[in-house]
Image (spheres, rainbow, N blue to C red):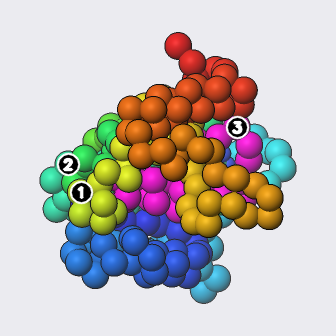
Amino acid sequence: MRIDIVTIFPTFFDVLDISLLGKARQAGIIQLGVHDLRDSTHDRHRTVDDTPYGGGAGMVMKPEPWGEALDGILTGSDDPLLIFPSPAGDVFTQAMARELSTESHLVFGCGRYEGIDQRVFDEYSARGRVRLVSVGDYVLNGGEVATMAMIEAIGRLIPGVVGNPESLVQESHEDGLLEYPSYTKPAQWRGHDVPPVLLSGNHGAIEAWRREQSLARTARVRPDLLP
Ligand code: ADE
């Protein structure tokens, strides 16, 4: 998969050099391009924003740098999907992460200030696929943190990124439920015991206990996820 990011804070994405996604890049499973939006400006101050038409607080990102940056990235791409992180978008879920993990080219446009001039969305929606995606019902200062969260959730679902694919199957949200609690050695720690069933060697009983824990935790914390 190819991933391009347009941002005014390119160094923010330096962390994608490390950990599993860093390894996936080294292995050539993910190709990443991080683009400074200010490289697509042509004035002395490298201006990316201006005051809103109609008045109001805050600044709006100008369309021209976005147009130049995105044209450069999209030219020659087969079937790119352009994603703008926005609190006004569809809510990002594990199901969406799975769907997006099959794309060949994702382009993230990280807005700042009060947002990006609407005509940028209109232009690229007329030319191809564009999605506005929210990572939750709260407001961030810009799209960078949301993009990082999405790239991590999507990237780890690409075959070869996570060493043991089994570990993807058993985690929270994959079966619509929250994950059961996990334990490792020692069997006793500060007076807390590992549940005896996990030491029993009885795989059927362990499976049943985990399912029951998942259901109970989901009912307690996220009843909205239960059918
Ligand atoms: N930008 C600002 N807030 C956001 C959110 N909740 N999700 C995605 N992008 C955002």
Of residues 172 and 144, which is closer to you in this image?
A: 172
Q: Nearest to the eye among marks 1 and 2: give it.
A: 1
Residue 93: x %, y % from top left? 50, 38
The residue to which callout 2 is attached is 79
Q: For disc 3, does the CB lie below 8 Å from ligand 1?
A: yes
Residue picked out by circle 3: 137
Q: Is residue 127 left or right of residue 110?
A: left
Q: Is residue 145 magenta?
A: yes
The secondary structure type at the circle numbered 2 is loop
Earlier-in-chain disc, 1 versus 2: 2
Q: Position of residue 116 (x, y in %)?
A: 59, 51
Cα separation, mark 2 vs mark 3, equals: 30 Å
Q: Return the mark for residue 159.
A: 1
Q: Which one is closest to the eye, mark 1 or mark 3?
A: 1
The stretch of residues the image draws in magenta is: 130-158
Amino acid type shown at disc 1: Pro
Amino acid carrying label 3: it is Asp
Q: Is residue 206 magenta?
A: no
Q: Quadrant of the N terminus?
A: bottom left
Residue at position x 28%, y 81% in the image = 26
Other residues around mark 2 within 10 Å, as few (<14) / some (14–19) / many (≥20): few
Q: Quadrant of residue 163?
A: bottom left
Task: Please name the amino acid that badge 2 sits on.
Answer: Asp
At which x and y percent is residue 117? Answer: 57, 49
